[in-house]
């Protein structure tokens, strides 16, 4: 049987290169020189290989910008829980594309999906969508003037027309091959995500000529489906295939999945600083059993969830990160001290972020039209 990725499951990936090859995803490194040639510095996540794969980034984004096309970036968040450092990874990318490449940003609040697949009560989904997702995105620095936020259940006729027309261009066997499940909730959620990805190209939503979709690699099934549907709707509506990028999924503090449903192992951007510190101090590291052993053998940053936090979020300076890496490997740095240093940076970030959040929460409600039920 063909290998599948489950966008609604709990994916843990050991070998990203293998995964990339199995699904025909290109290595992101190949486009970094082209990005530089076009005059753009790569982002921290690009430089560090956290953004490991892409489809058509060069064709849609770089070519699109070069030829004066209008390129947008779109992603979606399922309002099923609190905003955490995994979400921040996506947020940072949106902010980069907005500031550095000047792209217009679309953010889907996937409330239809949250209701159908995760059974999130409607009012809850709306509140979480606005006060957790939109508010945190703004507090992180996404410019609301250059961003369009919307709820999937409240987007307008041309968007829904895409869902309906797309449903006529895919078979049950294909859906089953991609998702392994034909529950109506999943079929409709998948086709709704197709409309999310494609609708900025419609006149009514700005007529963008290219759309880039940054996601975790678990979402690739939706992108493959979208690409097929674009081809099959030719002659019905003029669309081009989206570009997509894939990031590695940041691990939780026990090495398992980072997820709202695992709060002990997940740091939320709204965690009271002391709560966050306590979680961090208990995190799984790549350290040895005793201090003596660690001085002798050194630690293993690759296996360490604290190092992950440095790599993804807490240490923007590459040289400083390299120093931490070396000191860990050589045994000069021990986990206790290292965790205290991480906690200090984490708390500094959380305090600054949270001081912006209250105002962002108020602004957030004015930036989106909530569905009526
Ligand atoms: N399915 C995505 C998730 O579970 C959310 C989502 C909805 C999305 N629409 C999208 C992501 C469009 C990217 C593009 O997180
Ligand atoms: Fe992780 Fe730091 Fe310990 Fe190295 S020293 S294993 S980076 S906590």
Image (cartoon, rainbow, N blue to C red):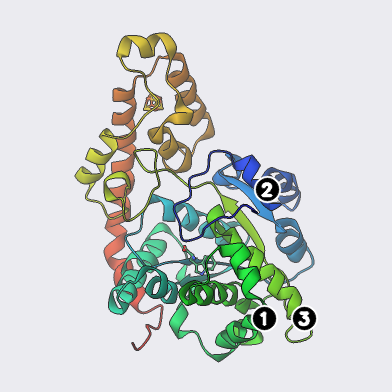
The local secondary structure at tag 1 comes to loop
When the figure is inspected, residue 167 is found, relative to residue 79, above or below; the finding is below
Mark carried by residue 101? none
Mark 2 or 3, nearer chain start:
2
Mark 2 or 1, nearer chain start:
2
Q: Mark 2 vs mark 1: give the one in front.
A: 2
Task: Work out which quarter of the rendered image holds the C terminus and state it.
Answer: bottom left
Mark carried by residue 22? 2
Q: CA distance from mark 2 to mark 3?
A: 27 Å
Q: Mark 3 vs mark 1: give the one in front.
A: 3
Q: Where is residue 214 drawn, in percent x and y?
A: 57, 59
Instruction: Say if disc 3 is inside 8 Å of ligand 1.
Output: no
When the figure is inspected, residue 139 is found, relative to residue 280, above or below; the finding is below
Task: Please report the residue visible at 38 percent of the width from the left and 19 percent of the height from the top.
Answer: 333
Mark 3 or 1, nearer chain start:
1
Q: Where is residue 146 drawn, in percent x and y?
A: 52, 71
The residue that disc 1 covers is: 207
Residue closest to the far front: 1
Task: Please report the residue visible at 55 percent of the width from the left and 43 percent of the height from the top.
Answer: 50
The local secondary structure at tag 2 comes to helix
Q: Mark 2 vs mark 3: give the one in front.
A: 2
Q: Does residue 120 appear to the left or right of 111 in the view shown?
A: left
CB within 8 Å, label 2 to label 3: no
Task: Please report the residue visible at 30 percent of the width from the left and 62 percent of the height from the top.
Answer: 357
Q: CA distance from mark 3 to mark 1?
A: 16 Å
Instruction: Say if disc 2 is inside 8 Å of ligand 1.
Output: no
From this viewpoint, is residue 27 visible? no
Q: Does residue 18 appear to the left or right of 181 in the view shown?
A: right
Q: Nearer the viewer, residue 310 or 67?
A: 310
């Amino acid at each position: 049987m063909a290998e599948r990725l489950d966008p609604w499951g709990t994916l843990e990936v050991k070998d990203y290169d293998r995964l990339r090859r199995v699904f025909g995803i290109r290595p992101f490194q190949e486009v970094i020189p082209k990005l530089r040639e076009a005059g753009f510095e790569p982002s921290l996540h690009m430089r560090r290989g956290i953004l490991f794969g892409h489809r058509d980034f060069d064709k849609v984004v770089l070519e699109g910008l070069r030829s004066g096309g209008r390129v947008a970036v779109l992603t979606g968040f399922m309002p099923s829980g609190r905003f955490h450092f995994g979400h921040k990874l996506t947020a940072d990318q949106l902010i980069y594309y907005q500031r550095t490449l000047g792209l217009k940003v679309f953010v889907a609040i996937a409330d239809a999906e949250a209701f159908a697949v995760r059974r999130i009560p409607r009012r809850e989904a709306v509140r979480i969508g606005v006060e957790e997702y939109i508010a945190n995105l703004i507090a992180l620095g996404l410019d609301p003037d250059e961003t369009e936020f919307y709820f999937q259940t409240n987007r307008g006729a041309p968007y829904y027309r895409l869902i309906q027309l797309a449903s006529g261009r895919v078979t049950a066997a294909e859906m089953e091959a991609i998702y392994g499940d034909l529950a109506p909730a999943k079929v409709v959620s998948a086709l709704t995500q197709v409309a999310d990805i494609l609708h900025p190209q419609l006149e009514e939503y700005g007529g963008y000529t290219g759309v880039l979709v940054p996601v975790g690699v678990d979402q690739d099934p939706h992108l493959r489906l979208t690409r097929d549907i674009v081809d099959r709707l030719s002659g019905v509506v003029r669309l081009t295939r989206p570009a997509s990028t894939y990031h590695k999924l940041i691990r939780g503090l026990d090495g398992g999945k980072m997820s709202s449903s695992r709060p002990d192992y997940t740091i939320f951007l709204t965690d009271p600083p002391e709560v966050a510190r306590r979680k961090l101090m208990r995190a799984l590291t790549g350290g040895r059993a005793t201090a003596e052993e660690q001085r002798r053998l050194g630690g293993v940053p690759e296996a360490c969830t604290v190092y992950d936090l440095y790599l993804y979020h807490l240490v923007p300076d590459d040289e400083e990160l390299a120093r931490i890496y070396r000191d860990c490997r050589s045994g000069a740095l021990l986990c206790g001290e290292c965790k205290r240093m991480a906690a200090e940076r984490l708390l500094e970030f959380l305090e600054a972020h949270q001081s912006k959040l209250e105002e962002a929460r108020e602004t957030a409600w004015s930036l989106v039209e909530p569905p009526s039920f």
